[in-house]
Amino acid sequence: MKTTLILVGLWVTLAPAWSETAVFRDVQGKVEYQTKGDDWLPAKVGVAIPVGTAVSTGFKSTAALEILGSVVYVRPLTRVVIDQLTRNAQGTKTNLTLLSGKVKAEVKPSSATLDTSFQVKGPTATASVRGTGIEFDGENLLVNHGEVNLTNRWNVSRLVQGGEFSSVGKGASVSPPVPVKAAEKPALTSQGGAEEVDALFTASETAGAPPPSVPEVDLSTVITVFGDQLVLTEGGSTATDLKTQIQDLQTPIATVVATVVVQ
């Protein structure tokens, strides 16, 4: 009897880790995936992939994955590995490793009874997300809404909130968060279900592109403004000037660069 009880207990503990998968919800261009020890295969909408799978996108190619109620958009020329997908009575836990490129994520917030843990680890920094929308390339982080802990390899950390940008420096520094745009409205809620995820894809299929004169302020825009390996100084008017010019969206990027102070 004791042996039987132990085996049942082990099954209950391990089953969630075995059963959870990510699902391709959108595939554009050349997108491939590779499970451990297997060949690279072309990604298709509806294909489920387990823990340990790597996803790779080619030039001008993108993918979107539904992961435990959250959505991850894999940008062009990106390789990301799914390290952990677990669900239990306490909530869900997702860990991704970003080997190269950039991802955007809409993460389902925690509720009063279920905790959502979502982490993206890059070459030099880790973004720990709890119910928010981010764009992250392993070094530079733009938070669209919610808040994220950005931590470098020396465990130096900054709390970055909606509408703010931060970046890890060449040394042991993490730049002070800089407000670059207004925080967006969350796309997913703790009370919502599959219908909210479905709505994200419906919206992306029907939404028109923004007018050419009003470019979107996304991570690519901010990185272009800030430049590579930027560390902003504390205090001063730099952040205010930068915020004003980016939010205006009419100021040429070359003019915005002049307001940046690099350490």
Image (spheres, rainbow, N blue to C red):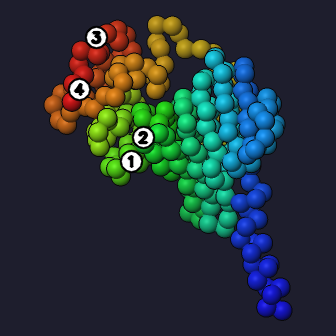
If the image is split into quadrants, where does the C terminus sit?
top left
**Vertical relation: 206 (above or below) 63:** above
What mark, if any, has residue 153 been given in the picture?
1
Q: CA distance from mark 1 to mark 2?
A: 6 Å
The answer to whether residue 79 is visible is yes
First-in-chain label (4 vs 3): 3
- Looking at the picture, which amino acid does disc 3 mark? Thr
Tell me if label 1 and label 2 are in contact, CB under 8 Å. yes
Q: Which residue is mark 2?
A: 124
First-in-chain label (2 vs 3): 2
Q: Position of residue 38 (x, y in %)?
A: 78, 41
The residue that appears at 69% across and 48% down in the rendered structure is 52
Q: CA distance from mark 4 to mark 3?
A: 15 Å
Q: Which residue is mark 3?
A: 255
Q: Which residue is mark 4?
A: 262
**Vertical relation: 245 (above or below) 179:** above
